[in-house]
């Protein structure tokens, strides 16, 4: 995290699958704009313990590592699932993975603040 911040990142997210809540709390105590990410296969309930320490959430809709993958989940269903688990809180919601230009309006309408596009912009 420190190295990424030193290189100028405005927001850094770590995964709930690899960072336990105690470590995450320590990171957020030492740095601003730290978010928690979740893989498409992880139960959304896993985010609950992290919500006390951040308002930045990254939902991945593909498994990390390769551009231009097909979505592993339905984007809107995943956003709705998030909204049912993390409620009554002002959040920054980021969605990453398989996001196309055609998805942007629907994502905005459903509360996504940042839509990450890699392959949609740069191709394969």
Image (cartoon, helix red, strand yellow):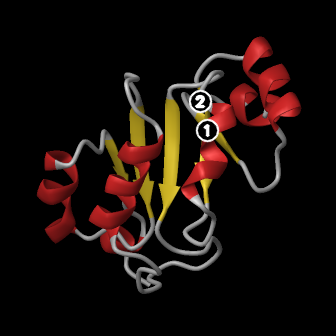
Marks 1 and 2 in Cβ contact (< 8 Å) = yes
- For the image, the number of numbered tags is 2
**Circle 2: is it few (<14), some (14-19), or many (20+) Cα within 10 Å?**
some
Nearer the observer, 9 or 43: 43
Q: Residue at x 61, y 64 (%)?
A: 39
* Label annotation for residue 114: none
Q: Quadrant of the N terminus?
A: top right
**Circle 1: is it few (<14), some (14-19), or many (20+) Cα within 10 Å?**
few
Residue 17 in the image: state x and y as whole percent.
Answer: 76, 56
Q: Residue at x 80, y 34 (%)?
A: 21
- Which picture quadrant has residue 80? bottom left
Q: Residue at x 45, y 68 (%)?
A: 97
**Left-right relation of 84 to 102:** right
Question: Of helix, strand and loop, which one carries label 2?
Answer: loop
Residue 59 in the image: state x and y as whole percent.
Answer: 49, 55
Residue linked to disc 2:
51
Q: Residue at x 55, y 69 (%)?
A: 40
Q: Is residue 7 above or below residue 112?
A: above
Residue linked to disc 1:
48
Nearer the observer, 3 or 110: 110
Residue 2 in the image: state x and y as whole percent.
Answer: 81, 28
**Left-right relation of 102 to 121:** left
Alpha carbons under labels 1 and 2: distance apart: 5 Å
């Amino acid at each position: 995290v420190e190295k990424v911040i030193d290189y100028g990142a405005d927001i850094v997210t770590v995964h709930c699958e690899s960072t336990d809540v105690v470590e995450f709390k320590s990171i957020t105590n030492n740095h601003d704009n730290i978010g928690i990410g979740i893989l498409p296969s992880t139960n959304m309930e896993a985010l609950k313990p992290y919500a006390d320490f951040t308002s930045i959430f990254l939902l991945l809709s593909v498994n990390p590592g390769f551009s231009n993958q097909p979505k592993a989940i339905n984007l809107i269903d995943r956003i709705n699932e998030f909204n049912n688990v993390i409620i009554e809180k002002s959040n920054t919601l980021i969605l990453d993975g398989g996001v196309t230009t055609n998805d942007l309006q629907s994502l905005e309408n459903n509360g996504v603040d940042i839509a990450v596009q890699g392959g949609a912009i740069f191709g394969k």
